[in-house]
Amino acid sequence: MKIQSLFPKSFFVFLFSILFLYGCSLNQENELDQLPALEISNASYGIDPRQKMDVFLPAGRSAEKTRVLIYIHGGAWIDGDKSEFLQVKPMVEQAFPGFAMITINYRLYDFASRQNRFPAQEEDIKAALLYIRSKLAEWDVSEGILLSGASAGAHLALLHGYKNREDDIKGVIAFFPPTDLTSLFGFNNLTTLGLTEIMGGTPQTVPLIYQNASPVNFASSDDPPTIFFHGETDQVVPISQSERLETALKNAQIKHEFVRVPNQGHGFTAETNAALLIQANTFFGDF
């Protein structure tokens, strides 16, 4: 016996239409609720023209889930610019999806005027981090920060990860970093001249300045996990600098990973950089 439906077909068509429209409305509301991507160029964290940063905030960010990666450029503390980050930004976005990213300028030492001797650069990163922390809520990102940098920038990232660390710094990524300036002095004539000028003397005449500027001297058990990469043929910053860092981190029992990069020097190929950034993300995992 055929059982007749209590509702006509037109009722089901009407009901399906209502549910479909309701679902579309929810999707539109969710899209509208998501924050759009935002780029902030040359945000000032101080009065000096060099005290600026660029900020890249992802779409759909939130204070609960969006972590922050800060990049500090290299250049031997005398050269370089935050725009260096743009060369690797697509790789970083692929390796660290959903992260907010910030790249920082800092005052550079001037050989002509002899202005901005160290620790001007260290003080600038302190000021930049203070500014960033004051903006986290406004930018709708979390308090979880990864510090990263290359060469002199890696040195500053490590120094702030260990010496000037606060609890929101969850890890450090360092590419071919100077780590012990006392032992780096004398590596070659340019290094000797540069460090003498920037530090205002030699390790014999101003030993405390060299000691206070060397990340290896501040490694302690509560420091953040660190991954660092160094080319085996580096002729600018010898790989022995990362070997010294490895020894200091082992002694302090800090979680770390030291990656030797064969057949590459002070700077890696794009393919190598992309692979190492993915390795860094795997090292940190969720934090």
Image: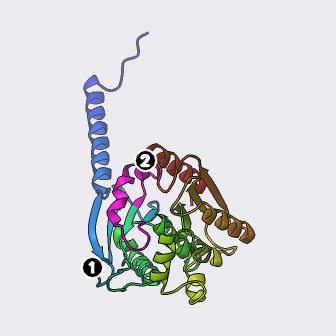
Is residue 285 placed above or below 183 in the rendered structure?
above
Which of the two residues, 89 or 155, is positioned nearer the viewer here? 155
Residue density around tag 2, few if under 14, some if 14–19, many if 20 or more, within 10 Å: few
Q: Which mark is residue 279?
A: none
* Residue in the image at 27% along x and 71% along y: 42
- The image quadrant that residue 256 belongs to is bottom right
Marking on residue 94: 2
Q: Secondary structure at mark 1?
A: loop
Quadrant where the N terminus lies? top left
- As drawn, the label of residue 49 is 1
Left or right, 112 with reference to 164: left
- Residue 97: x and y, percent? 44, 51
Magenta residues, start to end: 74-100
> Who is closer to the viewer here, 119 or 19?
119
Q: Amino acid at mark 1?
A: Pro
Taking the magenta stretch, the answer to whether it contains residue 25 is no
Q: Amino acid at mark 2?
A: Gln
Q: Position of residue 14 (x, y in %)?
A: 25, 32
Q: Tell me the CA gap for discs 1 and 2.
A: 31 Å
Residue at image coords 68%, 67%:
249
Q: Quadrant of residue 106?
A: bottom left
Magenta-drawn stretch contains 98: yes
In the image, is residue 244 above or below residue 89?
below
Per the image, label 2 sits on a secondary structure element best described as: helix
